[in-house]
Image (tube, helix red, strand yellow):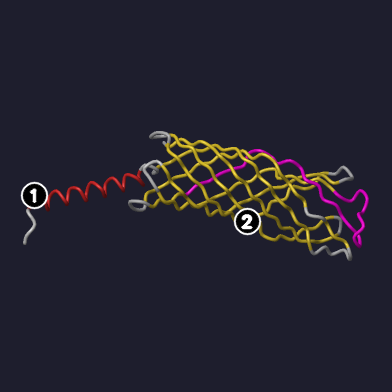
Amino acid sequence: MTMNPLIRMTAALTFAGLSMGAFAQAKNFEGMNATGSVGYQTATGKISDMSVANVTVSDTSLAGATVNLGLEYIISMNDQYTLGLGVEANVLPSNSGRHESYLNGTKIANNGGELKVASSYGLFVSPGMAVSSETLIYAKLGYVQLTTSGTYDNGTNRPNNSSNGYSLGLGLKQLLGKNTFLFGEFNYITLQTKDGASGGATYKTSGSATNGVVGIGYKF
C-alpha cells in the first residue's frame, strides 16, 4: 500500500516546520549580548609552606557583594544547543578579611593584616541547551585573573598581587522579549598555587571563591 502523495507532502512540510521551529528555539539566543549582575561572593585565601620554622598564617575569609559586567557572543550549534564566548569583570572591590601569624600556635602580636579582592577579570566559554523558546540552561568554563590588595598591621600597604585560576559555573537565561533577558548563575573559582615572598620569608599562596548572581542582559 503506497502513501497518498498529499499525505507524504503534508508529513514532509509538518516535519520541516517542526525542525525550523526547534532550530528557531536555539536561534532565539544567538548574537552578541551585554549583561550586568549583582550578587554575593565568598572567598578564602591561604598561605602555606612558610620558610620560617614553626610559623603559620591563618586563612583569610572574605565575603560581600559582587557587581559584574560582561559581553558574550552566542551561536546556535543545532536545533537545541548553543555555544558562547565571553568576557566579564567584577568591578566592586570586596570587603577586607583578616589574617594572623602564629609561632608554635601562639599569635604573634602586630604581625597580621587585612586583605581584599581589588578586582577580577575572566574569559569563558558557555555551552548551553535551549529547553524552550524562552529558556536556556548553560555551563560556564573560564579562566580568571584576580588581584588582591591590603595592608599590614605596621601600616604599610601590601603590594598588589595577581593570581590566575579557573572557574566553573551553571546558569539559566529567561527571555523577556526579543532583546532582553533575565539570568541567574552560580560559579566556583579555584586559584593556582603561587610562590610569594615578604620580609625575608618565602611561602605559597592559593585560594578559592564562590558566588551567586542575578542580572539582566540585552541582546543586540
Is residue 33 positioned above or below 82 on the image?
Answer: above
In this image, 61 relative to 90: left or right?
Answer: right
- The quadrant of the picture occupied by the C terminus is top left
The x and y percentages for residue 32 are 43, 41
Which label is found at residue 131? Answer: none
Disc 1, SS: helix
- Callout 1 crowding tier (Cα within 10 Å): few <14, some 14–19, many ≥20: few
> Which residue is drawn at the image coordinates 37% and 49% (left, top)?
76
Amino acid beneath label 2: Gly
In this image, 149 relative to 213: left or right?
Answer: right
- The quadrant of the picture occupied by the N terminus is bottom left
Q: Nearer the viewer, residue 16 or 121?
A: 16
Q: Nearer the viewer, residue 167 or 119?
A: 167
Q: Residue tagged by mark 1? A: 6
**Which badge, 2 or 1, comes first in the chain's sequence?**
1
Question: Does 25 appear in magenta?
Answer: no
Magenta-colored span? 85-112
Question: Which of labels 2 and 1 is toward the front?
Answer: 1
Amino acid beneath label 1: Leu
Q: Distance between the Cα atoms at labels 2 and 1?
A: 60 Å
Question: Does 88 appear in magenta?
Answer: yes
Which label is found at residue 165? Answer: 2
> Which residue is drawn at the image coordinates 39% and 52% (left, top)?
81
